[in-house]
Amino acid sequence: MKQKALSFALLLTIGCFMACGTSKEKTNNEEEEEVVFNRIEGDSTIYGMACDGCNDTIVVYLETPYNGTDPDTLNILEASKQHKIFGHPRIGDKLAIVRNGVDTTKADMVIVTEDLQGNWCYKVLPTLRMRADMEGHTIKQKISQLPDTIVKLLKVEREYGISIKAENVAFPIGMNRQRATSDEESPVEYPKLKFYNEWFIYNGKIVLRSVRPDSLGQQQVLLSDTADLEMLTPDTLVFHFAEGSRGYYRKTEK
């Protein structure tokens, strides 16, 4: 099944380059990863590949599945004004497009999924682990009673994040199982890191999930969070979850 999907993606890429022109150049022998869009039931997002002619006013793309037709064009002027163009489309980039529900010649949102992929991180600080003798005290009072070694621990940041990969794969950043025992014994505690291993787009929203196969091989959803994209630049990503916004910085692999 995966082999068929990859073969289809390769044919689509070839078709896009023939219809759109020359692809963007890759540097340092960078290999192009193929994204296979797994459409979820109920998702009205348009998936395709960017063609020559994309600018701040229009997006030119070949929709998947590619059927040999000419590229389609949608007006994105209003979406640009509303900051709903996430990423910078270049020839051959994979796009997720939300078409306007009233005027089908316009797009309300465009996401360059290749710009979304990468390692995205943020820093967290610990909080003081509660003890029985601290009840009834304010945070300031509690900290004032602590030795300097523990106060210093409250200032030690950790790097959390998520790695967004091709083919809807995700990995958590900052999860270290070897720290579990020492963390339990520590006088400070860090926020729990959510374990996501899958991502996809649903009607312009980003869905992050933790899935695991059961005894019958069926995928069971253990955790699911939905976020709106608020910002996507080469080095900054902002998701808006139900509990608020979360900003990330891009971490370059060494």
Image: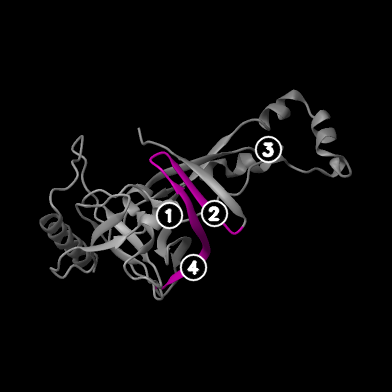
Of callouts 4 and 1, the N-terminal one: 1
Going by the image, does 112 lie left or right of 154?
Answer: left
Q: Are marks 3 and 4 in contact (CB under 8 Å)?
A: no
Of residues 209 and 43, the one drawn nearer to the viewer in this rendering: 43
- Amino acid marked by disc 4: Val
Q: Which residue carries the number 2 mark?
A: 240
Q: Which residues are magenta?
A: 217-242
Of callouts 2 and 4, the N-terminal one: 4
Front disc: 2 or 1: 1
- Amino acid marked by disc 2: His
Q: Which residue carries the number 4 mark?
A: 221
Q: Is residue 100 visible?
A: yes
Tell me if residue 76 comes above or below residue 219 in the rendering: above
> In whole angstroms, how far apart are the C-alphas of marks 4 and 1?
29 Å
- Amino acid marked by disc 1: Lys
Location of residue 57 in the rendering, given as x and y in whole percent from the top left corner: 31, 53
Label 2 Cα neighbours within 10 Å, binned few <14 / some 14-19 / many ≥20:
some
Label 1 Cα neighbours within 10 Å, binned few <14 / some 14-19 / many ≥20:
many
Going by the image, does 87 lie left or right of 173?
Answer: left
> In whole angstroms, how far apart are the C-alphas of marks 2 and 1?
14 Å
Of callouts 2 and 1, the N-terminal one: 1
Q: Which residue carries the number 1 mark?
A: 84
Location of residue 223 in the rendering, given as x and y in whole percent from the top left corner: 53, 63
Q: Which residue carries the number 3 mark?
A: 186
Front disc: 4 or 1: 1
